[in-house]
Image: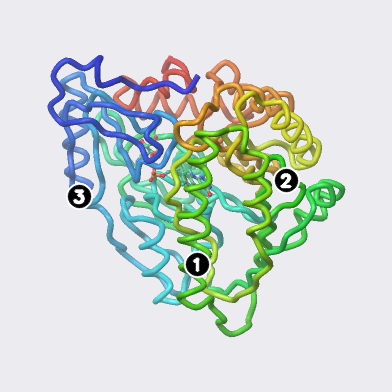
Amino acid sequence: MPRRCCTVNEVQRPRTGVVRNWAGNQACVPVEVARPTSTEEVAAIVRRAHDDGRRVKVIGAGHSFTATAMTDGVLVRLDGLSRILDVDIQTQRVRVEAGMTLHEFSRQIHEKGLALPNLGDIDVQSIAGATSTATHGTGRTLGNIATNIVGMTIVDGTGRIHVIDEHDDRLNIAAVGLGALGVICEVTLQCVSSFRVHAHETVEYLDDLLADIDGFASSADHAEFFWMPGARRCQVKRNNRTEQPLDRPNTFEVVRDKYVGENLAFGAVCRVGRRWPALAPRIAKLVSSSVSEREFVDDSFRVFASPRHVRFVEMEYGIPLECLGEAVQRVREVTGRLSFPSLFPIEVRVSAADDIALSTGTARENGWIAVHQYQGAPYESYFQQVAAIMDSYGGRPHWGKMHYLDAHDLASRYPRWNEFQQLRRALDPDGTFRNEYLDRVLGPID
Ligand SMILES: Cc1cc2nc3c(=O)[nH]c(=O)nc-3n(C[C@H](O)[C@H](O)[C@H](O)COP(=O)(O)OP(=O)(O)OC[C@H]3O[C@@H](n4cnc5c(N)ncnc54)[C@H](O)[C@@H]3O)c2cc1C
């Protein structure tokens, strides 16, 4: 069950007010909110909390659906640590403070001729928040955002500062740390030359995509599709690197497609579906028929990320790529049997293998299946049935999205699990960064 770290009712005298995540399904009341502006200040905050026996947790943009960033101890916000510190044009490496958002980072490095090789659907997350949960986009040859980390500065659970570079074995453990190893204050990211993307959106039959899912995964640098349960056709996005000149949608098209279509109108039909679930099949047809083919060329970071104003909850699993087609088919069957329909599309993506200990991509190419439900509509039965399917493939849940697993279930899905636990013991021996979510998914420190 997705849990709350603490509820408002459980806290007698909140001193800081309620902190909620973007989806509104997690809340906590920290005893204190700290806004440091330097690594030394972070170290002092953690040292003081450690000595007082308090817990510490950083919250980024609060875009995780789990309680991963929730605490009743000291909540640290890194808005004051959000500057680019160094750009090395030669090596294409950028040192940046961890609180900067992916959007601001992409915008600023674009001016220097650089880009991140890939991004997810949105870019409002903080850099460290995104990397700590292995946030990913789509692309068969592309790892998640944490795979770009080549160095970091992290404050451990006793307030000591560690500078970890690429020659340090700890780096490819700490890169996806779930907030359990310390407060990341700076990261150095390996970037690439900025690039343009030719975006091609089409409408295709789900059956055709499932008949050759491997071919689909290789059909573009970044291939993904969205399928509305109940519909026969999908919205398919194939983004390829291109040298073609910019050919951006005009302002009218952006407002029509991104704001009115994907947010205002979609939000309205979701509200109708939540109130009158029997209309869901007609809504599915309406939503899928409202999508049309389009093409444009834009800078990579502007293509990858879109505004998301319709609130939802989400569960996403990475499974071995070869199981993806069968798994989507099984999820499709589940959606046909739900007592309350899914009002949101299912998103299917792919990602490359990496060697980071708790990265969801560790040692395998993943096919990703994300299921969503509109905020306030029932999702438990749906998510649990899908989770059972994903578990049958040894699926790895996204660390920032809802799931039902605990440390016992997860340990066997990560070959380097023990190495992570060893580093956790070394960096946070007294559990300064523990919270209810970490207790569940990582278990006790010793
Ligand atoms: C609308 C929406 C779209 C999304 N799209 C995608 C997608 O396309 N792909 C994908 O993979 N995910 C996606 N996600 C999930 C999201 O990327 C992750 O949950 C991500 O972790 C959120 O980043 P954040 O800055 O909000 O971090 P938070 O949710 O605030 O924190 C996440 C974790 O990181 C820790 N943390 C944050 N900063 C630090 C730090 N400085 N040092 C140590 N630990 C830290 C927190 O304590 C917490 O454990 C989406 C989420 C939403 C709501």
Q: Earlier in the sequence, mark 2 or mark 1?
A: 2
Q: Quadrant of ligand 1?
A: top left
Residue 14 location in percent, x, y? 15, 23
Mark 3 is on which residue type? Ser
- Crowd tier of the residue under label 1, counting other residues whose Cα lies within 10 Å: few below 14, some 14–19, many 20 or above: some
Q: Earlier in the sequence, mark 3 or mark 2?
A: 3
Spatial CA span between label 3 and label 2: 51 Å
Q: Report the front residue among 31 and 236.
A: 236
Q: Which mark is residue 256?
A: 1
Quadrant of residue 411 in the image? Answer: top right
Q: Earlier in the sequence, mark 3 or mark 1?
A: 3
Residue 424 location in percent, x, y? 42, 27
Spatial CA span between label 2 and label 1: 23 Å
**SS at circle 1:** helix
**SS at circle 3:** loop
Q: Are marks 2 and 1 in contact (CB under 8 Å)?
A: no
The residue singled out by tag 3 in the image is 38
Q: Is residue 263 above or below residue 381?
A: below
**SS at circle 2:** loop
Q: Report the front residue among 99 and 200.
A: 200
Quadrant of the snapshot with the C terminus: top left
Q: Residue furthest bottom?
A: 245
The residue singled out by tag 2 in the image is 231
Q: Is residue 244 above or below residue 362?
A: below
At horizontal 47% and vertical 71% (from top left) the residue drawn is 114
At horizontal 40% and vertical 70% (from top left) the residue drawn is 109
Q: Nearer the viewer, mark 3 or mark 1?
A: 1
Answer with left or right where residue 229 lies relative to residue 418: right
Answer with left or right where residue 343 lies relative to residue 432: right
Q: Report the front residue among 248 and 351.
A: 248
Q: Is residue 183 above or below residue 264?
A: above
